Image (cartoon, helix red, strand yellow):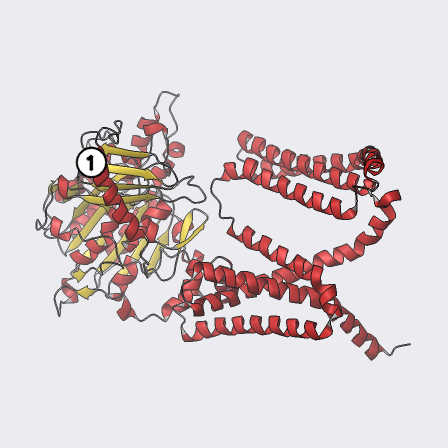
Amino acid sequence: MLSPRRSRAATWRSFIAFVWPSAIAAICASTLVGIIEGALRVSTLLHVVAAGGYFVVIAAPASLAGSVVIRVVWRSWRVGDIITAMAESGGGVPQLAAWLSYGLLALSLFLIASLNTLRLLLAATSAPTVVNLAGTLIMTAAFAVLVALSWPSVQLLTRFFRAVDRVAQARRGRSVLTPPVLATAATVALLTLLAGTWFITIKPSIGPFDTTPLHYAAALAAIVAVVHTLWPQLAARRRLARVVNGSVLAVAIGLLATGLYARYQTPYTLLEIWGETTIAGQAIDRLYNRYDLRGEVPLDRIRPRPRKAGAQRATSPDIIVMTVETLRADRTPVYGGQALMPNLTRLARRGAVFEWAFAPSNNTRRSLPAMMLGQNPDRIRGRVVGWALRLDPRHFTVAERFRAANYQTAGFFCCRSFFDPSLKLGLSRGFVHISLTRKDADLAERGRQWIAQYDTDRPLFVWFHFFDPHDWEKNQPPEKGRQTASRRYDRALSASDHALTELVSLLLERATRRATIIVYTSDHGEGVGDHGQRNHSTDLYNSQIHVPLVIVGPGVQHRRIQRPVGLVDLTPTLLDLAGYTPPGSPDMDGVSLAPLLRGEDDETVASGRAYAVMVEDRSVEKSARAAIAGRHKYIEYDGSDRVELYNFVADPKEKRNLARAEPQLLRSMREHMARYRASARVSPF
């Protein structure tokens, strides 16, 4: 009998002997796939190797755990003994074929029942408790029925497969229902079922979805399976096994060491791995605080340079930016619309009104970052998280630049899903004081009180983002069914404007005492039925990207500017108006509109340029781009030959496509688009 110490030692040896093949398989798979991810995504050899190391950090433990669990389950069920017991004359296992067939059929029926149950429940009610409770009960009942039917169904299927196998043996002299054949057929059938469920049922319902992690998971699983298959032959050759084991461990340790080296020797460039990779980036998210890495960047890197040497801070103006969600220009009174918006009208009477201002995109997560960075949406790096875009930490917001210039920065925002600092999405970076609430009236009042109590010599940079118009359908229900969608949308704009009354009064009064620049604009418009679209994120017509832009401030004359501009120009304009030189390309794609506001630049329609992008992601089905030059807008769609050309000044509803009627103009606009496409390939860092 073994002593307790020897017994424990034997147990540990058995455990290590069992786990070791899975460990080598997991390390080997994660190392290979990690290097592949790094090679496909990042630029330098150092980053490729470091990315592989961070990939191993996440993928190796996950692969090891999955492999061990599968092997434990396999051994616990004694699958080999079960298959042997099921074997009949000729080596066939018709009963196993019956169980596999019923399992796949039951899984198919359960998926169909589950998906359709959820679809019907969500169509019938929006109450989460009802959906969760009813869905659970119905799916539990479906599962119970499938379990109850399993035994009689398998008996019938066994008879069928046994008859088929007898015929095959009579003709071929051997069984066609052998375990290897069934395993292959079951694997193909399962993959086909899952792929069909994804592409036919799930994917069309949720829109575009990043399947990259699934690709990596499949590659890891395949390599782990191959290593386990080859392990018995490898283990039999001990010398070769030692060489392979040592090599795999050495490579993995080298990758991990390179990752640590990159963190502590080149911490800022480590952010490239976060921004460009999927799995390695997730590891960096979990291991480090990206803001700590950002904190190692000296302020001199982003501090704006004064246009005039020795410029005094006391002369710097306060800057107040107000962006109103989902606000299309042509529905406001300043642009001929019917909505009652006296506060916007007050601002327009004191400043410059841009007749044709275009949002960088048609949804918030693409437009607001472009406005705050001064970069076109197709050059902004980040990941879609919920409804927002989590910015690559290498981007610097306008608030960070003003904070580096000794401005007191504050943000009053809706909503938490875009601006909550705890979510680390990036848009709130640079704002020292942040207030978050959903209702426009509450947000405006918080901002008004904070600005009214602010009493220091440091200039202010304050950004408001109001949200109420986004919920126009919910907040403005039809009265007795007689109100059109158009009228309800106008009422929502009027209500939002009314919420700003006291804030606008304070700002205009403050502007009489100290230099104050006030900007009023929007991140995108709304379909409201135009081109068959009720909301936004669906096209790049004027209804979704033509937005108001009003700027009030010292030296800004009250006039209407006909020249088309893009809101990607907003950040460089603010820096210029504050007395600083905008960074220019490649840091920013936008150009300052300050010379235009001062009357120093051409303001004719023909001189205007703008660019907008619809980026395919989780809720946007297709990518499209719009280039604006002069009075014309050219739209093209990625992966399609479809093009559109409009004279948006003469045809603001964009009903007449000039693409065929104006071939020379079409060629010219394509050249404009080619330049924008080329600039999109330039790294923003």
Q: Point out residue 302 in the picture as x, y percentages from the top left corner.
A: 27, 65
Q: Nearer the viewer, residue 2 or 417?
A: 2
The residue that disc 1 covers is: 665
Residue at the spot x=37%, y=69% of the render?
Answer: 295
Q: Point out residue 335 in the picture as x, y percentages from the top left corner.
A: 19, 34
Residue at the spot x=30%, y=47% of the render?
Answer: 444
Please indicate, yes or no, whether residue 472 appears anywhere in the rendered image.
Answer: yes
Disc 1, SS: helix
Q: Which of 223 and 362 is in front in this view?
A: 223
Please say if 217 is above or below 266. Answer: above
Q: Point out residue 602 in the picture as x, y percentages from the top left corner.
A: 10, 46
| Residue at the front extreme, as displayed | 172
* Residue 82 left/right relative to 281: right
Please say if 9 is above or below 497. Answer: below
Pointer 1 local density, CA inside 10 Å: few below 14, some 14–19, many at least 20:
some
Residue at the spot x=40%, y=72% of the render?
Answer: 266
Q: Nearer the viewer, residue 348 or 206?
A: 206
Q: Which of 438 and 650 is in front in this view?
A: 650
